[in-house]
Image (cartoon, helix red, strand yellow):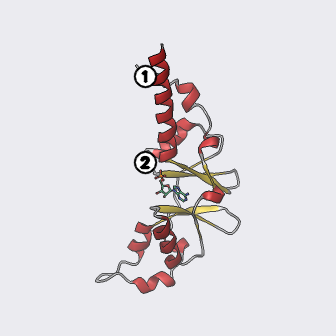
């Protein structure tokens, strides 16, 4: 039977698993929706964090938010993209983590979200924890565990 050695894996902090802020694609609160759509399309990400110039976290914006906001009754009103800003449509209700939170807490939040933002006490953005990173860590652990069992 596979033992997860839960304390060792789930009790560790997420600190070493996050993608740091400088490697995370983001948009600014005052960017217009045309720019945000360009960033989302070019990166291929479904959603990205919304920051202010001081790197404070304000929300998340996704392609769905943007498309929904320009959906008219009979057509998609593309001309609105230029005049609306990210803060008009972003999602402000988002779960977040702190650097010292455990992998177990991260795993719990990632059940419902493809990634979770990590911020400090002053809401300054520090990076993201993604589903891929957590699954990769658990997969590596299971594999190592299996290999050790085969040697027994
Ligand atoms: P993944 O688990 O790598 O597929 O990532 C899940 C989601 O996390 C993506 O769809 C993006 O919304 C977000 N994401 C992952 N990596 C980045 C990054 N470097 N910059 C911005 N968002 C990211």
Q: Nearer the viewer, residue 149 or 47?
A: 149
Please identify the residue farthest to the front as the structure is shown.
Answer: 151
First in sequence: mark 2 vs mark 1: 1
Q: CA distance from mark 2 to mark 1?
A: 25 Å
Q: Is residue 31 left or right of residue 69?
A: right
Residue at the extreme left: 74
Q: Quadrant of the N terminus?
A: top left
Rendered view: 151 above or below 13 = above
Relative to 16, say whether 60 is above or below: below
Q: Position of residue 44 (x, y in %)?
A: 45, 64
Q: Which residue is denoted by mark 1 in the rendering? A: 2
Tag of residue 138:
none
Query: Residue 5, image x and y in percent?
Result: 52, 23
Side (left or right) of 59 relative to 56: left
Which residue is painted at 35% across and 81% down in the image?
76
- 2 or 1: mark nearer the eye: 1
- Pointer 2: residues within 10 angstroms few (<14), some, or many (20+)? few
**Tally of marks:** 2
Residue 55 versus residue 150: which sits nearer the camera?
150
Write down the residue under mark 2: 112
Residue 65, given in percent of the width and then of the height, sits at 43, 68
Q: x, y percentage for residue 48?
A: 52, 62
Nearer-the-camera pick, 83 or 92:
83
Q: Residue placed at 54% from the left, 39% from the top?
A: 105
Taking the spot 50% from the left edge, 84% from the top edge, the residue there is: 82
Looking at the picture, does residue 54 appear above or below residue 69?
above
Seen in the picture, residue 32 relative to 25 is either above or below; the reply is below
């Amino acid at each position: 039977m596979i033992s997860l050695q839960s304390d060792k894996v789930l009790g560790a902090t997420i600190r070493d698993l996050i993608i740091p802020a400088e490697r995370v694609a983001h948009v600014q609160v005052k960017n217009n929706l045309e720019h945000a759509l360009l960033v989302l399309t070019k990166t291929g990400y479904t959603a990205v964090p919304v920051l202010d110039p001081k790197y404070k976290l304000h929300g998340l914006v996704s392609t769905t938010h943007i498309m929904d906001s320009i959906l008219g009754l009979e057509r998609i009103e593309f001309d609105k993209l230029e005049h609306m800003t990210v803060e008009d449509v972003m999602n402000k209700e988002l779960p977040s983590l702190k650097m010292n939170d455990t992998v177990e807490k991260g795993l719990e939040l990632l059940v419902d979200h493809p990634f979770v933002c990590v911020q400090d006490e002053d809401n300054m953005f520090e990076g993201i924890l993604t589903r891929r990173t957590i699954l990769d860590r658990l997969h590596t652990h299971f594999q190592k565990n299996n290999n050790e069992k085969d040697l027994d």
